[in-house]
Image (tube, rainbow, N blue to C red):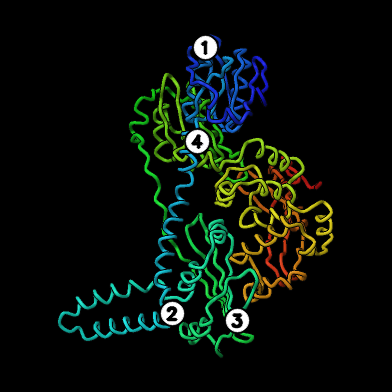
Amino acid sequence: MRGVRFICGIVWVVCWAGLVGGACGQSVNLSQVESLQKPVSLRLKMRPLRELVNQIAQQTNTTLGVIQAIEQYKVTVFVTNRPASTVLNLVAQQLSLEWQRDSQGRYFLTEPTRVREARLKLARAAEQQHRNRAMERLRRLQQQAQTDFTTLHARLKQLDAEQDRLQALQPSGWMDTMSQLAQARAQIADAAETLPRYLLGKLTTQWSPEQWARFWNGQAMLASTKPIPIALSLPADLVQWLALWSPNSFDRPPDSALVLARWDGESGAIHLFLIARAGEQSLIFTETVSVGEASAPESARPALAEQALDVPETPIRRRPNEPPFQSPYVQPVATLADHLEWLAERCDVAIIADAFRLPLRMLEPHRNARTLREWVQNLTREEPVEATYQDGFLLLCHRDRDTLLTNEIDEPTLETIEQRAQSDGLSLDDYAALAYQLTREQQQRLETPNGYALRFDPAPFHNSIPALRFWASLTATQKQTARERQPIAYLTLSAVQQRLFWDAIEHALMTPTLPTDDLLTTLDQLYDPESQANLAFYLDFWKNFSFEVSTEQVKLVFEDVEDYQKTLQEFAASGVSVAVQERERHSYSLYFGFEANRAARYPIAWQSPRSRVPESASTDR
């Protein structure tokens, strides 16, 4: 069979595309496989499925397989002397997978096509809801924008004035009239109240299928009153509409305008920028058109009391003078796998759970629980976790498992960068390489505060992934040029690099927290093909050091070496034991624009430890 390794007692990975989804296998109950009745013992915390199947294959001397598409799904398993078939069946159950047998009688783990399709559909349900609601809003704006803005705005002012008059006079039957006026106002208000929304309705009626695809993909859409090759044309009457809509904003009548629009699928909003110019004066009007929160899909799950009803009252062993729980990550967080490891060391229970780098709400495990049932009740009450007890196993899964399977980064990738962070420290290249391979779903989760529990500083990913992807696309020669603080001309970039260059610029333009100097007010120049010869990428960077001194009571951070050494001397004189850690802070600025002071700038910084020195306080540092 193509793309498959067969070694008895070793896991083989099914790579043949025809096997994905179980197309070439038959469902099988492993409890009927004699070799898999052998008891196995496993201690796996947050490990890939491939590793689990490999260990069981070795312990039972059975050839087992796993489909390549799911081999990196993660599990936590703590079992002692349990039948291999039971463990494998329950693992499949927890992840909605299926064991199948191929035509040659070999067993492999797969994800049924129906399960995979349903999971992907559910994972993207929120974004689809946002898009559907956005289309409803856009259709309403498009309909209202069929009327000239001057007429629409005048009608709105007329309705408002009539409502104010009735409110002041309150004649007989005025409430019924007010209701009629309110209904009439609602028919036009969305487009008539603000010119950016009106223009959004006007412009979207002109978009081609290709432009709609770019919009839904999050690319910025440009329109201008002046001819720009890649921009749609704004109505010639726009300059008059500007004066009508915001008459006190300009010293003289505006002479040109541009509109920038971008869809944010994660938050369900359209970001609008209207840039108007009157001679040397430029004004920016911003607006966010929200389409509302997506409703979470309802899932039928048992009540919390029912979840723990069958869990036995197995005692949890308490340890005298047990130290506080220490987070293994750079953030003070813990995952379900961390809590289950703590439980497995103190309670005689077999545990099988899905595993994700998702921080729990609570750092500390429930150390005050006296029994397993009490511990499970506390866990499911406070955390988004389901728990059941079946055939002597405690089974747990995250309530958002389907979404997490879509946006989880595989463990080998994370462990590689974490090991490098602990040994040599991370470089800009390391962060860029990870950013370049992220899927859209992984990027969104990584940009979310506490989206992942990580053993390296995730700060460079916050709002800077487009810039990191561009850096990852550069050749070694280009990177060396940038590190020498020499510009890399836009016209020397490849087609892929140019697209990433624009992705970085447009993301910065639509992100208020990123500095862009005057690029927004000079969009016509930025998008003018003749100006592209002046565009370039620039890099600036520097580093500094700090010293962290910790005792059992306090933690002090110093950037000044003299203050740091003086404090060490004071601790030494007092006989206080301290731990010292030297940290290195890397700071980069990535510029995309005409020159460093006329560009979108991505400030990227992170910290890495230089040394970890637990010691008694001394002065010889």
Q: Residues within 10 Å of mark 1 (few under 14, many from 20)?
A: some
First in residue order: circle 4 vs circle 1: 1
| Amino acid type for the residue under numbered disc 1 | Val
Q: Are marks 4 and 1 in contact (CB under 8 Å)?
A: no
Q: Which mark is residue 282?
A: 3
x and y percent of residue 82 in the render?
Answer: 51, 15
| Amino acid type for the residue under numbered disc 2 | Phe
Q: Is residue 167 visible?
A: yes
Outermost left residue: 172
- Location of mark 4 (residue): 116
Decide if residue 415 is on the left or right side of residue 196. right
Give the CA separation, mark 3 to mark 4: 51 Å
Which element carries disc 4, helix, strand or loop? helix
Decide if residue 447 is on the left or right side of residue 498. left
Outermost top residue: 34
Residue 510 location, quadrant: bottom right
Give the CA separation, mark 2 to mark 1: 75 Å
Q: In what quadrant of the picture does the N terminus appear?
A: top right
- Location of mark 1 (residue): 33
Compared with residue 376, is residue 288 higher up or lower down, i.e. above or below?
Answer: below
Give the CA separation, mark 3 to mark 2: 22 Å
